[in-house]
Image (spheres, grey):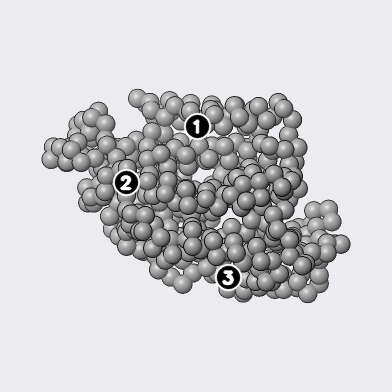
Amino acid sequence: MTDRATATFEWTPQPQAAAVVAGLLEKASGDCPFLTDFSVALAAQTGTRLIDWVDHFHLPSGTKLRDQLAEVGFTAERAGQREIWRHDRGMFPAIVLSDGLTVQRLAIKVESVADFLVAQGLGDEVPIHGDPLSPLRTARVANGESSEVWAIERHGAVGFDPTAIDAEEAAAVIRHAEACWRRRRRFVDPADGFAHARGLMRAAIDDLGVNRTCELFFAAERRYWQRRNRAGRVQLARQDALGLGWANHDHHTFRSSRRWFAELIASLELLGFFCRERFYAGEEAGWGAQVLEQSATGILVFADVDMQPEEVVGDFAHEGLPSNDEVGTIGLWCALHGEAFLEAGLHHLECQFDYQSARDQLAAEAVESMPPFTDFDFLKQAFTQGEIWPVRPERLEAALSDGLIDAAEVEKFRREGALGSHLEILERNDGYKGFNQTGISKIILQTDPRRQRAAKSH
């Protein structure tokens, strides 16, 4: 565990692989008018791009394509009559090659195939493959001369074939989804909160396995977050109008106090996450993060915590961090609102967009963005203006007693509330899989409740 947690990940853009994938998308779109129209609707109604919704391509086998994929960094694994090609160094759809297949298929990822069919005006005209509540469901939504477009919903499934589900397992899905959503989050001692959450996780894992439990847990986390974030509600409504849900999520960010950081990591590892790169925003920012990935579900987590330069060298994710008398941006946020894993909820959800279109369209909905903190050709990032949350009196009193804030700040937060959550707008190009290690320092300081005012929550 420690070796993997402290490994170095150096992500770089993969323009050659991106060009191959873009060619496949162009060919599919040229043969199927549905894809062309859908791409236009995505851009106009959601500020997103078609490529960011592609789950996989399924194509006839061919030596030329195999050679192309291998040349640009894809590697294959055999699964029956299929070859599954994936790119470990870039963020790309899977490419499935099958012997005997006569058409090319493109699968669009959605949270609910049924919702997608209704939104696209197809209703019950199109059969759904896979039982309701099963881990994987698909539906063919359009045909071209030599191509097909499918919708696919995944709930921790890594394959490509719809699956059956019996009545007992279906009931367990409903029961554990409700348990994740109703999870008690407010505890006097956070240790009890982490123990309670892990108890719910273990019960779900016993019935459903790790991957399905992870999906249920994070669906509940997004739902809890968007209740307190207007930007998230606005954008989700825009995406739901096309039947998509949050299937374009990129990463979920939990803020943690130093005291409870190792407990957060342990809880995420129970859900099948592994520690990927460590992140340090710079000495002036005073914070760092552990990036975690759950490969089967495609869920990424940013776990943020106050830290010093020398602490990033060790395995801080598992060894823990001692409490400090002073707090930085992350620690103060947790003191005022609670642990993100517990009472506060996610600090932000980040999804993949057409960066400028999304910012412009959200601005038209009275959702303004903060200045961008990344503006590279291969990566663009910006937060929406933060929500202001009320702060419970007992938290203010505790923060004052611990010397984390002064009396004037107590009165300010009591009167005005404190900066809470954001939606993050991100655009990735050339399959870039990493994050900006330098430009984020300034923007994180601007999310410190002591420094910024934002519009009141809606």
Mark 1 / mark 2, whichever is N-terminal: 1
Q: Position of residue 51 (x, y in %)?
A: 59, 63
Amino acid on which the number 3 mark rests in the picture: Gln
Mark 3, residue position: 14
Q: Do the residues labelled 2 and 3 touch (CB within 8 Å)?
A: no
| Dot 1 amino acid type | Trp
| Residue depicted at 66% across the width and 50% down the height | 122
Q: Which residue is drawn at 22% across and 47% down?
A: 450
Q: In this view, does 300 lie to the left or right of 438?
A: right
Disc 1 or disc 3, which is closer to the eye? 1
On screen, residue 389 above or below 441: above
Residue nearest the observer in this picture, 404 or 364: 364
Q: Is residue 313 left or right of residue 420?
A: right
Distance in Å between CA atoms under marks 1 and 3? 38 Å
Q: Are marks 1 and 3 in contact (CB under 8 Å)?
A: no
Q: Nearer the viewer, mark 2 or mark 3?
A: 2
Could you say where residue 405 lies in the image, as x and y percent from the top left?
Answer: 19, 40
Q: From the image, tell me which residue sits under label 1.
A: 181
Marks 2/3: CA–CA distance: 36 Å
Q: Name the residue under label 2.
A: 387
Query: Identity of the amino acid at label 2?
Result: Glu
Identify the secondary structure beneath mark 3.
Answer: loop
Residue 387 seen in the figure: yes
Q: Are marks 1 and 2 in contact (CB under 8 Å)?
A: no
How many callouts does the rendering have? 3
Q: Observer-nearest residue: 152 or 400?
A: 152
Callout 2 secondary element? loop
